[in-house]
Image (tube, rainbow, N blue to C red):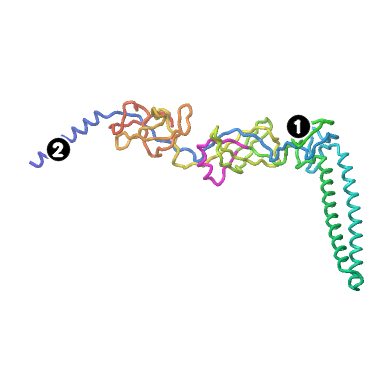
């Protein structure tokens, strides 16, 4: 009796298995291909000088002499433009004369004070005279200090009639001519430094976490000139402020002093961003299923049944895509996905698509 019952159960099980196999769909599958650890991001950047200034005069006046022109290289402290300083020089001479007069007055008051001090000790003169001479000496001393300050002020005014280079660089623009009246608001020259250049690139905000968590980011800089070779550099600094219109943030790459680039040029920058090893895999584009909300998913086969996996699309080429959210050991369906849904029984055939 037990044997008979066992045989019946065996027949029923085999019948159910054969029925399920007959009702299952056959799908083609592939195994994901693990991608490289680093993600390369290609951007375009601009060469910018450390110092780029519109130079103005500290004094108003008529331009008397222009000592440089556009394209000239100047050193720090070099005279660039001179204004007519005739009136300022006259006032300087007056201040110098006032200083001499104040010094004579101070020396005389000091002599008179020292003279009365000796007489006071001998009780020859009244103490009130001593107090008067002391007050006169203090007054002349204050006047001397005031005249000295006035002289320094006038010397500074005369000095400001000459525009000096605040740093070494190249004159890129000249905006005035001899004989023109200028004020502190006029841009006279534009000076651009050429010994400290850097490149700024705009990076999309979706890469912020990867860059912010990295200790160092390699950058391959290729100038957009025919004779320049690529340079292997590193990112010097990230500016952690996003642009409201473009949703990007900037990275700065300092260029070596030996570079042949100049401010205003462009260059292509390839940043190598670190990414988790297991997070990126390559799949045939036919494995993707797009949803109305713009998201993507793929179908995997687990225990001969379909399981849907939500994924993030990182990049796409002609027939391949790079995604996140798929394990390297997963079995991914690449054909027949239109008829599939979660839990559908399937049989698998290895796809001939190259992955």
Q: Is residue 134 left or right of residue 259?
A: right
Pointer 1 with pointer 2, Cβ within 8 A? no
Residue, x 89% and y 46% (percent of image)? 94
Q: Is residue 157 above or below residue 349?
A: below
Q: Does the segment drawn in magenta span residue 210?
A: yes
Boundaries of the magenta span: 200-219
Residue 160: x, y in percent? 81, 42
Quadrant location of residue 135?
A: bottom right
Quadrant location of residue 294?
A: top left
Locate the N terminus and report the quarter of the image it occupies.
Answer: top left
Q: Is residue 32 left or right of residue 190?
A: left
In the rendered structure, find residue 117 and report the number of the disc placed on it.
none
Q: Is residue 161 left or right of residue 223?
A: right
Residue most extreme to the left: 1
Locate the C terminus and report the quarter of the image it occupies.
Answer: top left
Q: Earlier in the sequence, mark 1 or mark 2?
A: 2
Residue, x 81% and y 38% (percent of image)? 80
Q: Secondary structure at mark 1?
A: strand
Q: Is residue 18 above or below residue 92?
A: above
In the rendered structure, find residue 173 and report the number of the disc placed on it.
1
Say few, some or many: other residues with alpha carbon within 10 Å of mark 1 (under 14 / 14 to 19 / 20 or more): some
Q: Nearer the viewer, residue 176 or 20?
A: 176
Residue 73: x, y in percent? 78, 37
Residue most extreme to the bottom: 122
Q: Does the segment drawn in magenta span residue 8?
A: no
Residue 28: x, y in percent? 35, 29
Q: Secondary structure at mark 2?
A: helix
| Separation of residues labelled 1 and 2 (CA atoms) | 97 Å
Q: Which residue is mark 2?
A: 9
């Amino acid at each position: 009796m037990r044997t008979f019952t066992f045989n019946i159960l065996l027949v029923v099980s085999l019948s159910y298995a054969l029925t399920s196999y007959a009702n299952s769909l056959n799908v083609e599958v592939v195994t994901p291909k693990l991608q490289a650890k680093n993600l390369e991001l290609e951007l375009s950047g601009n060469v910018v000088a450390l110092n780029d200034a519109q130079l103005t005069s500290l004094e108003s006046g008529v331009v008397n002499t222009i000592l440089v022109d556009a394209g000239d290289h100047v050193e720090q402290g070099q005279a660039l433009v001179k204004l007519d300083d005739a009136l300022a020089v006259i006032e300087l001479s007056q201040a110098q004369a006032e200083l001499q007069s104040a010094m004579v007055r101070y020396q005389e008051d000091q002599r008179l004070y020292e003279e009365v001090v000796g007489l006071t000790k001998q009780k020859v003169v009244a103490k009130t005279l001593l107090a008067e001479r002391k007050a006169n000496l203090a007054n002349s001393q204050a006047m001397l200090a005031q005249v000295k300050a006035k002289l320094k002020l006038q010397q500074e005014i005369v000095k400001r009639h000459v525009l000096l280079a605040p740093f070494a660089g190249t004159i890129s623009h000249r905006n005035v001519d001899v004989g023109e009246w200028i004020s502190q608001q006029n841009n006279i020259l534009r000076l651009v430094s050429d010994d400290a250049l850097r490149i700024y690139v705009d990076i999309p905000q979706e890469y912020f976490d990867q860059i912010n968590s990295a200790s160092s980011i390699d950058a391959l800089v290729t100038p957009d000139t025919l004779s320049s070779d690529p340079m292997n550099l590193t990112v010097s600094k990230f500016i952690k402020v996003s642009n409201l219109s473009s949703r990007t943030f900037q990275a700065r790459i300092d260029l070596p002093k030996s570079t042949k680039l100049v401010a205003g040029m462009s260059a292509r920058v390839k940043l190598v961003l670190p990414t988790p090893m297991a997070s990126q895999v390559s799949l045939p584009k036919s494995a993707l299923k797009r949803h109305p909300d713009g998201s993507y998913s793929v179908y995997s086969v687990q225990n001969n049944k379909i399981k849907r996996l939500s994924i993030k699309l990182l990049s796409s080429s002609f027939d391949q895509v790079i995604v996140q959210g798929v394990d390297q050991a997963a079995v991914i369906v690449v054909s027949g996905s239109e008829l599939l849904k979660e839990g559908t029984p399937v049989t698998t055939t290895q796809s001939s698509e190259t992955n």
